[in-house]
């Protein structure tokens, strides 16, 4: 699976969060529930200062028990303090550009990424959804590197 190394500036993400793990049998429902909450629960419309309309799925706070998943949008300034505010640190990331059915393409890409010998830092990783076409999604996945 091809990728490029990119250096990103810090990003601020506002959205909704939950904690899960790859071993959690309900991981898919937890993450899917966050997306549903964001869009059908009215949170997406309430996010102020969006940089763009790209949705972000952020994985952070990695530990032995799992990680935090936040779905939301990048903002220029965090004003929605009733929502989760997370920072994507500036740094070096492996960027994977994928295309296809959003859920299936992302799941397949992560399966391949987990098998790769990347010098991951496990600070945070994220998906940036560049369009809203569920069947023909354009998604960039960023994996933080040491």
Image (spheres, helix red, strand yellow):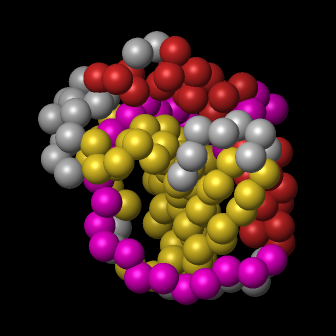
Q: Give the percent coordinates (x, y) of residue 83.
A: 31, 28
- The quarter of the image holding the N terminus is bottom right
- Counting labels gives 0
Whether residue 119 is visible, yes or no, is: yes
Q: At x 39% / y 34%, what residue is drawn?
A: 15
Q: At x 72% / y 26%, what residue is drawn?
A: 29
| Camera-nearest residue between 59 and 80 | 80
Whether residue 68 is visible, yes or no, is: no
Queried whether the magenta region covers residue 6, the answer comes back as yes
Q: Quadrant of residue 92?
A: bottom left
Q: At x 59% / y 62%, what residue is drawn?
A: 140
Instruction: Report the span colored magenta.
Output: 1-28
Q: At x 55% / y 86%, what residue is drawn?
A: 5
| Camera-nearest residue between 31 and 4 | 4
Q: Give the percent coordinates (x, y) of residue 68.
A: 51, 44
**Residue sitting farthest toward the top:** 41
Queried whether the magenta region covers residue 119, the answer comes back as no
Above or below, 138 relative to 50: below
Above or below, 129 relative to 5: above
Q: Give the percent coordinates (x, y) of residue 79.
A: 16, 35
Q: Give the percent coordinates (x, y) of residue 139.
A: 63, 56
Would you say 105 lies left or right of 143 here? right
């Amino acid at each position: 699976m091809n990728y490029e190394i990119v250096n990103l500036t810090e990003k601020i993400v506002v959205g909704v969060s939950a904690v899960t793990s790859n071993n959690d049998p309900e991981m898919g429902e937890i993450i899917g529930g966050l997306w549903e909450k964001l869009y059908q629960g009215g949170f997406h419309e309430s996010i102020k200062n969006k940089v763009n309309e790209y949705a972000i799925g952020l994985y952070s706070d990695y530990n032995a028990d799992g990680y935090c998943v936040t779905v939301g949008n990048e903002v220029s300034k965090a004003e929605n303090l009733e929502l989760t505010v997370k920072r994507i640190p500036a740094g070096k990331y492996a960027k994977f550009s994928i295309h296809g059915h959003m859920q299936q393409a992302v799941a397949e890409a992560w399966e391949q990424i987990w098998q790769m010998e990347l010098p991951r830092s496990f600070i945070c990783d994220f998906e940036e959804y560049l369009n809203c076409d569920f069947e023909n999604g354009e998604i960039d996945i960023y994996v933080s590197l040491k």
